[in-house]
Amino acid sequence: MKEKVYLETLGCSKNQVDSEIMLGILNKHGFSLASDVDKADVIIINTCGFIESAKRESIDTILGLAQMKEFGKCKILIVTGCLAQRYSKELSEEIPEVDVFLGTTNFNEIAQIINKTINNKERVVYTVSADKALEYDLPRILTSPSYSAYLKIAEGCDNCCTYCIIPKLRGRYRSRPIEKIVKEAKNLSEMGVKELIIIAQDITRYGIDLYGNYQLVRLLEELSSIEKIKWIRLQYSYPDIISDELIDLISSNNKICKYIDIPIQHCNDEILKKMNRRTTKAHILKVIKKLRNKVPNISLRTSLIAGFPGETDEQFKELYDFVKDVKFDRLGVFTYSMEENTPAAQLPNQISEEVKESRRDKIMLIQRDISLKKNMDKIGKLYDILIEEKVENENVYIGRTEFDAPEVDGVVYLNSDTEISIGEFVRAKITDALEYDLIGEVVNEFSK
C-alpha cells in the first residue's frame, strides 16, 4: 500500500479543479487518499497568492499543517499552487518544514515528485514557466457535490490588468481544444454531474489563441448537446467581448442558465483606464442593456474594487450611484490590495485601508437593499430548484435556482413533507424572501 495523501485546497474554483486532477493522478498511481490529516503520510497544500488576505491564509495554513511533521504521521509536506509559483525561493528559506514546492503548471507531475522525494529525501523546488503547455485527458476526482462540477476551459490570462498578478502566476491565456473539453464534460455527466460551471480567468476570450477567433458560443452549443447536463453556468465573462451571438445563445438555449458573471471592477472611465480595463462605462451599460432586453429574467453578477489608487470621492460616488441605478442581482466588493510587481502598486495616491473598507461597506449596504427588493419580487413565482442539502431532523431542504452559483450566491429554503434526494431538481413556489435568500414550498418533483 502506498502512502496516504491529504490535500488541502485554498483559493478559487480553478485551484479546486487543479486539486481534483492531482487527486485523480495520485489515485491512478496507487496512493491512498486520506480525509483525515492526522492519518496522512503526505500533506499537499494547494495555495492561493492572488491578494494579500489570500497569501496570509495560505501561509497560516502551511504553518499550521507543518506541525503535523512533528505531531502527526506526515513525512512529506508539499506546497503547490500560486503562492508556490510566486514565492518558492522565499518560502523555502522561511519554512524549512516544507519538502517540495510545486508550481502552477507542473502539478500533473505530483505522483512522480512524491516518489522521488521519498526515495531521495531531499528538499526540492519544482517551479517552471507559468506559460507551460497544458496537458489533457488527466484523471480527476471531484471534491464538489456529485451533481455539480467546474469545467475549466482555459488557463492563464492576457488581460494584464494593472492590479492583478494572475498573468505572472498562471501564464498567458491558453485555451483547451473543444474536443478535449467536450470529452471531459461527457465523462462528468456519466459520473452524475448535472450542472457544469464554465470557468477560466476570462471565458469570453476562449479559443482566440487556438482558432484565431472567439469560440465560446461554439463550445457552449456542443456542451449543451450532452443529454444528462441540465444547467450550464457562465462565470468570469469580461464585458468588452460579450457578443450579440453569445447573448442570443443565452436567450435561446434552455440549458444555459440565465446567469452571467461580469467582473466590471469599476465604472469610472479614468479608473478603468488606470486599471488597463478594455472597456468604458458607456460600453458596460450597453452590454447590460442588451442582456436585459434579450434575456429579461437574467441574473447579473459582478465584482468591484473599492479604493483603487487615486480613486477620488467623486469617482467613488459615481461608482455608488452606478450600483444604485443598475441594480445588479448579485454583487461582491473587494478592497484594493496592493500587490508587488504590479503597475498599480507604483501608482501615487494609495488609499488608506480605513477609507477602502468604508467605501466597500457603503456599496454592500445599498446592494443589500437592492437584493432584498429583487427577492421580494420573486414571491409567488415558480422556479426550478436544484436540491443540495437537507436540514437535519426537519422537513426543510436547501437548494439553488439557476440564478444562483454555488457558495457565492443565495439559496432557497424549501418545506417538503415528501423525501427529496440530494441532487434532484424540483419545482417550487417562492413564499417569502430574505435579503439574499428565498423561502418556498415544493410544488412537484420533475427530474431525477
Image (tube, rainbow, N blue to C red):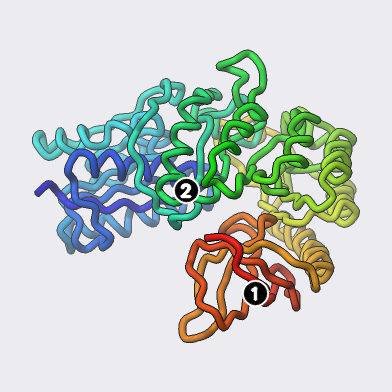
Q: Nearer the viewer, residue 297 or 267?
A: 297
Q: Which residue is mark 1?
A: 442
Horizontal relation, residue 47 to residue 371: left or right: left
Q: Earlier in the sequence, mark 2 or mark 1?
A: 2
Q: Say the numbered circle drawn on residue 233.
A: none
Residue labelled with disc 2: 55
Residue 309 in view in this figure? no
| 394 or 254, nearer to the observer | 254
Q: Residues within 10 Å of mark 2 (few under 14, many from 20)?
A: some
Image location of residue 21, percent across then percent down = 36, 40
Front in this rendered view, residue 92 or 161: 161
Q: In percent of the image, x 61 and y 42: which residue is there? A: 338
| Cα distance between the residues tagged 2 and 1 | 43 Å
The residue at 40%/33% (across/down) is: 104
Q: Is residue 428 above or below residue 328?
A: below
Mark 2 is on which residue type?
A: Lys
At 29% across and 30% down in the image, what residue appears? 126
In the picture shown, does residue 427 fall above or below 118?
below
Q: Count numbered badges in the picture.
A: 2
Q: Tag 1, which secondary structure?
A: strand
Residue 282 in the image, given as x and y percentages of width and height? 90, 35
Residue extending furthest toward the bottom: 393
Observer able to see residue 152:
yes
* Amino acid beneath label 1: Val
The quadrant where residue 118 appears: top left
Viewer-proximal residue among 233 and 353: 233
Q: Is residue 154 left or right of residue 71?
A: right
